Amino acid sequence: MPDRFPVVIHHNPDCGTSRNALAMIEAAGHAPTVVEYLRTGWTRAHLQSLLAVMGAGPRDILRDKGTPAAELGLLEDGVGDDALLDAMIAHPVLVNRPIVATPKGVALCRPSEVVLTLLDAAPAEFMKEDGEVVRATR
C-alpha cells in the first residue's frame, strides 16, 4: 500500500545531514522512497524537474565541499546552468544533499530540520546524531 503522503529523499548515507533528514522523515511515520543518487546518478530531466519545483537553479544545489567542483572550474563566475547540469550528471556528488520531495514541495534540506516544513506531521522532538534536539514549531 502506498504511503498516504509520499516522500522521496535523494540521499547520501555517508552524510550526517542526510541521515538526520531520513531519520526525521521516518520518525514522522513515513516510509520514504530512498534514492541513493551517488549509485543511481541523475538525469538532466529529473534535475530540471526538481529545480523547477524548488524555484532554484543548478548553482543553488551545487556542492563544493569534498567534490571536484573547484578543479572542474564550476565555482567560477560565468559558468552557465547547462555546464553545471552536465557536470552534475557526470559527477553526481556535485549535487548537494539531501533533496526531499513531498506533496508540499521540494527542498534542499540543509540544515536537516528543513525537512519538517515538507512533512504533513512532524515528531514533537527529535535528537540528531550529534545530540542536538530539534523541536517541531507547528
Image (spheres, grey):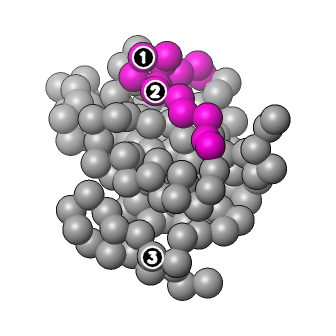
Front label number (3 vs 1): 3
Q: Position of residue 104 (x, y in %)?
A: 73, 59
Residue 58 position (above or below residue 114): above
Q: Earlier in the sequence, mark 2 or mark 3?
A: 2
**Residue sitting at x 69%, y 55%:** 105
Q: What residue is pinned by disc 2?
A: 36
Q: What residue is pinned by disc 3?
A: 125
Residue 57 seen in render: no
Q: What residue is pinned by disc 1?
A: 39
Describe residue 47's horizontal placement relative to residue 93 as left or right.
right
Q: Earlier in the sequence, mark 3 or mark 1?
A: 1
Q: Is disc 2 in contact with disc 3, using a CB cutoff of under 8 Å?
A: no
Instruction: Tell me how many marks there are.
Output: 3
Would you call the spot at circle 3 few (<14 residues within 10 Å), some (14-19), or many (20 or more)? few
Give, as a single range, the part of the protein colored magenta: 31-44
**Residue sitting at x 54%, y 52%:** 26
Q: Check disc 1 and report its element: helix, strand or loop.
A: helix
Magenta residue check for 43:
yes
Foreground residue among 108 and 76:
108
Q: Amino acid at mark 1?
A: Arg
* Alpha carbon separation for disc pair 1 and 2: 6 Å
**Image quadrant in which you'd find residue 47:** top right
Describe residue 52's horizontal placement relative to residue 65 as left or right.
right
Foreground residue among 4 and 58:
4
- Quadrant in which the C terminus is drawn: bottom right
Q: Is disc 3 in contact with disc 1, using a CB cutoff of under 8 Å?
A: no
